[in-house]
Structures are given as structure tokens and as C-alpha cells.
Amino acid sequence: MNLEKVQEILLANGYVVDEIKAIGYGQQIKFTNGSSVNVYDSGKLVVGGKEQDNVKALLGLNPGGQPAAVPAGGIVRGNNKVFVVYGHDEPARTQLEAMLRRWGMEPLILDQLPSEGQTIIEKLEAYTADVQFAVILATPDDKGHRSEHPDESAYRARQNVVLELGMLLSKLGRRRVAILLKQQENMERPSDIQGLIYIPFKDDLAKEAGLILAKEMCAQGYNIDVARI
């Protein structure tokens, strides 16, 4: 793996480069959180500083620091956890959860997880610590419009869905957050940020959105047999 690929992976996961300097037979990247990676001309990577386990997992390195088998186009993940955000559409959430479990994934749904006295934001931060992908289920639960412009009224996702979407985009990066948009012709998109992964569906989530979602997850290193979907 070269310097550019290391930067691409870690920047997409929220790491900020502090310094890049030449070392013997390679270069060292230092990040503002105290993590560092030595990238040698031979392709060898040596992870140092803080968050070593997380950096190794993101770069597809085993505990000894050697490259693990990397799926084509993706990164080896340490687990199969997927964070799920949803609003008031229980049937769609049930479809999504069942589909992810059929794929061998472990969906993490906030209201099914113990709170242990935490606020909602603290709980979300705690349970996304080792998650590498999130699926946002944006369904037409609310209706809104600009003040004094009722003619612009449109369906939109719940405010908690939009808040959690923003938090997960900040944590995981755009490529690791997919938004399943139900009945998009009637929906106001929860964000106009360019490059977000929007996957539309009408009623049958698995049939209409499953294959696209699986391909996006495979591109990020998850092991899903798309030929069987």
C-alpha cells in the first residue's frame, strides 16, 4: 500500500494529517490525534502513536502489522456491525433489519441497545465506536415548509434521523453512510451535501434497494455474496 492510499483511507475515517516527512526508505504520516503510519518504499506499513488497533483495522493489517487479505476495492473490517438509524416507519425498519441479518450482518439499532444512564448522543457515540458503516432509513414521517410558504410543503425525515445522519457522516465519511430514501418523489432530501449515497425505494426495501446497498457495503470491505441477493 502506498502513501496516497493510506491517506485516502484514514482521511475518509476522520483522521486529519498533521505532518508528512521523509524517513529512511519511506515516509511517515502523523495525524493530529497522535496516530502515525510509516509507509516504506517496499509497501510495508508500521503503525505507531495513538489508536493503533483502529488504524491497523482500517488499513487491513493483522495484529502483527502485516497485510491481511483485502477484498477487492475494500478494507478488511474487524467486525460485521452496521449502525441503523430510522424514524417512525416500523415495517421498513423491520425489513432492513431482517435483510442485514440474512447477509450475516449485526445491525445496531439505538432503541434496542442498553442506555446505561447515557444521553441519546452519548449512547450513539459509544455504540458507533467500532462500527464502519451506517444505514440511514429516511422515510416520509414529517411534513414541513418554509415559513409563510405552505405551497412548498413536503414530506421529510424525522429530526432525530437528520441529526444522527450528520453525526455519522462526520464520524465515518460519506462513502460509509448510505441513505435509503423511501418514496423519494414525495420526499425532501435530508441533506444537499454532494456525494452522499442515496438509494431510493418505494415499498419493497429488500427488492428495490438491497442489491445497491450490498454493493456499497462490499466496496467498503464487507463480505456479502451479491450473486445470491
Image (cartoon, rainbow, N blue to C red):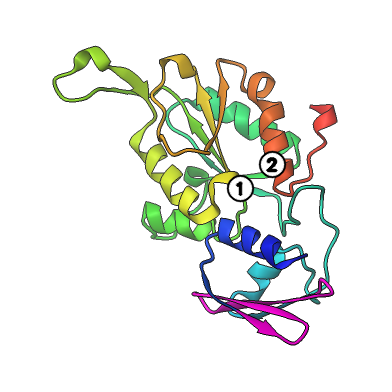
Instruction: Please tell me whether residue 29 belongs to the stretch shown in magenta.
Output: yes
Give the residue at x 55% y 53%. Answer: 172
Measured Cα–Cα span from mark 2 to mark 1: 7 Å
Magenta stretch?
21-44
Q: Quadrant of the N terminus?
A: bottom right
Q: Which residue is denoted by mark 1 in the rendering?
A: 133
Give the residue at x 59% y 45%. Answer: 175
Given the current orientation, which residue lies at the most extreme top position? Answer: 151
Given the current orientation, which residue lies at the most extreme left position? Answer: 148
Left or right: residue 146 versus residue 90 is left
Give the residue at x 55% y 61%. Answer: 129
User: In the drawing, what numbered circle is on residue 217?
Assistant: 2
Q: Position of residue 152 (x, y in %)?
A: 26, 16
83 vs 7: above or below: above
Three-letter code, disc 1: Phe
127 vs 42: above or below: above
Q: Main secondary structure of the magenta part?
A: strand
Which badge, 2 or 1, is on the more N-terminal residue? Answer: 1
Number of residues whose C-alpha sits closer than 10 Å to that of mark 2, classed few (under 14), some (14–19) or many (20 or more): many
Q: Nearer the viewer, residue 141 or 116?
A: 141
Say if mark 2 contacts mark 1, CB within 8 Å. Answer: yes
